[in-house]
Image (spheres, rainbow, N blue to C red):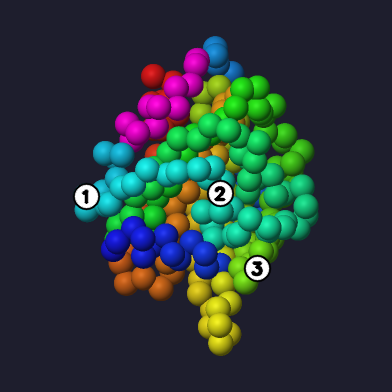
Amino acid sequence: MRLFALLATLSLPVAACGLPAGPPSSVVQITPSSHRPVNPARVDRLRGDLPPGYEIVDLTGLAAPAGLWGLGPKWSAEPTQCGSLGDPVHAAVETRGWSGSGPGGIVHVVVTGSPPLHTGLDPALVADCGHWTLAGGHTSGSVGLVDAPAVDGAATVAMSTATTTVVEGGTETHAHADTVTAYLGDYVAFVTVVTDPGSPNPPLGQDFAATLLVKTLSALRG
């Protein structure tokens, strides 16, 4: 499947079904660690971790999870404060990343930051956003928090997103996305895997995004 064709689906919303009813018992993992510098250029080292047959291109410009879920620039969230989980990089001026497309879906790997940009992930925000909705243009979606991987010296949050886009004539297009985000002081890194529920090909595994994020953070820190 060609990347440009897959990227076109990102403008389409995801169905709001199959999301968890509320946050799991371990949404955020925070573990102590000595500070290790992040080198965004190392994000390219993970390209070889995709299955065979994937077409890979560089990401250009700022990239936030909500945009990769298919939402346009003027989307909104309910509750409002949950929107920062969908766009934790709004003030960033430095972004590095890449996208790969293949039979199992589209994979986006991004690291972004602008020191000093981030103060970390607020546990209170996570507590309020176990399940939230977002909408923009012809696309709307539902987001549920799921178990996040434990990462040494970082706060992590994982989201399962379903979106639906209503196109001309009332036709609906659906998509699903798994996103895992890590807050690393001056940087934020995330992996988003977008799949088409109607595809005849089996999607990438449910843990693919989390596993790839852990590998990405290891590479970023050298």
CB atoms of marks 2 and 1 within 8 Å: no
Task: Report how far apart the C-alphas of labels 3 and 2 lie in the structure.
Answer: 17 Å
Residue at numbered disc 3:
137
Q: Which mark is residue 52?
A: 1
Q: Specify whether 144 is left or right of 173.
A: right
Question: Is tag 3's residue or tag 2's residue first in the polypeptide sequence?
Answer: 2
Residue found farthest to the bottom: 169
Q: Secondary structure at mark 1?
A: loop
Residue at numbered disc 2:
65
Q: Position of residue 182 (x, y in %)?
A: 55, 34
158 magenta-colored: no
Residue 179 visible in image: yes
In this rendering, the label closer to the viewer, 2 or 1: 2
Q: Position of residue 15 (x, y in %)?
A: 56, 70
> Across the whole image, how many numbered discs are drawn on residues?
3
Question: Is tag 2's residue or tag 1's residue first in the polypeptide sequence?
Answer: 1
Instruction: Give me the residue at 70% from left, 49% from top.
Output: 83
Instruction: Give me the residue at 39% from left, 32% from top.
Output: 43
